[in-house]
Amino acid sequence: MCDFTVAVFRPDDDRLEDAVELLESLGATPVPDPMLAVEPTGASPRDDADYTILTSKTGAELVAGAYPGTDSDGVADGGARTDRWNPGEATLCAVGPKTADALRERGYDPEIVPQEYTSSGLVAALEDRVDGARVEVARSDHGSPVLLEGLEAAGAYVHETVLYRLVRPEGSGDSTELAAAGGLDVACFTSSLTVTNWLEAADERGVRDAALEGLSNATVGVIGEPTGETAVAAGIDVDLVASEATFETLATETVELAAPTYYE
């Protein structure tokens, strides 16, 4: 077993709990520092599409009226309604198995899950099917333009519904100070927005340069090439891009890459 610190930036819900449990099982000391918080908009996807795409577990929970923070009537904090959505005759698509499982748990039947769990993977899975079709994309306000542009290029009529906004939680950033002090061994970035928010938190605490220096001596893993590009553009050295777009793969591969240092 190895004993080293791993910063994890998942939203502060069961995803963060699962991430902490996974890292502990790998022998690491998790540093939970949520860089994303969910603000539901109360919007629902259209119900007249030929294909409807969900890109996250959060989206699946929201369309079912089951996201934490909504009451039994589907009313979110602030009064926005999130009643259970009916997909009509649409073919339901999920970006990956986690989203598909979340949909199935709530009574939906996703029929298409791409082999590559990314926006590009969804485009590849659908591009031969959607010429002339109406495609509804239901996701956060920070969704990749790759999905919309790819589907439009394939001839689809695309509509996007923003189900929730992603914001940086107040008080986040403890891991930036740990990195600045040289005490962070591993960082696992799950999206470009987690990179951006981490750097904003470092700026807010006045430790950006020192935090970047600390990351240069740590092992940095990311999900997806776009996240890697965002990190590199910000001056962060990326050591690993996860072979699969899941946190489990990211954490396991990054810890395995870092671990040999601790066995010398």
Image (tube, rainbow, N blue to C red):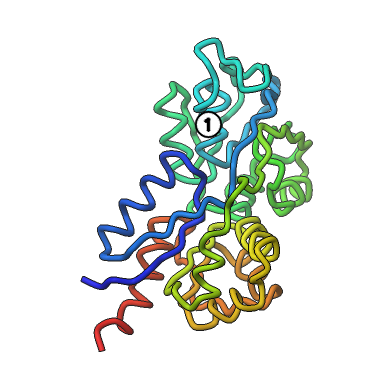
**171 above or below 93?**
below
Quadrant of the image for the C terminus?
Answer: bottom left
- Residue 229 x %, y %: 66, 71
- Residue 90 x %, y %: 61, 25
Left or right of residue 144, residue 112 in this image: left
Quadrant of the image for the N terminus?
Answer: bottom left
Q: Considering depth in this image, is 156 or 191 the residue closer to the camera? A: 191
Residue type at mark 1? Answer: Ala
Residue matched to label 1: 60
Quadrant position of residue 97: top left
**218 above or below 163?**
below
Which residue appears farthest toward the bottom when viewing the image?
264
- Residue 201 x %, y %: 64, 59
Q: Considering depth in this image, is 258 or 149 the residue closer to the camera? A: 258
Left or right of residue 145, residue 205 in this image: left
Q: Could you tell me which residue is drawn at 55 percent across and 10 percent down?
A: 73
Q: Could you tell me which residue is drawn at 64 percent across and 41 percent down?
A: 129
Q: Considering depth in this image, is 202 or 232 the residue closer to the camera? A: 202
Which residue appears farthest toward the top when viewing the image?
73
Quadrant position of residue 92: top right
Q: Considering depth in this image, is 36 or 190 the residue closer to the camera? A: 36
Number of other residues with Cα within 10 Å of mark 1, as a class: few under 14, some 14 to 19, many 20 or more:
many
Instruction: Report helix, strand or loop for mark 1.
Output: helix
**157 above or below 224?**
above
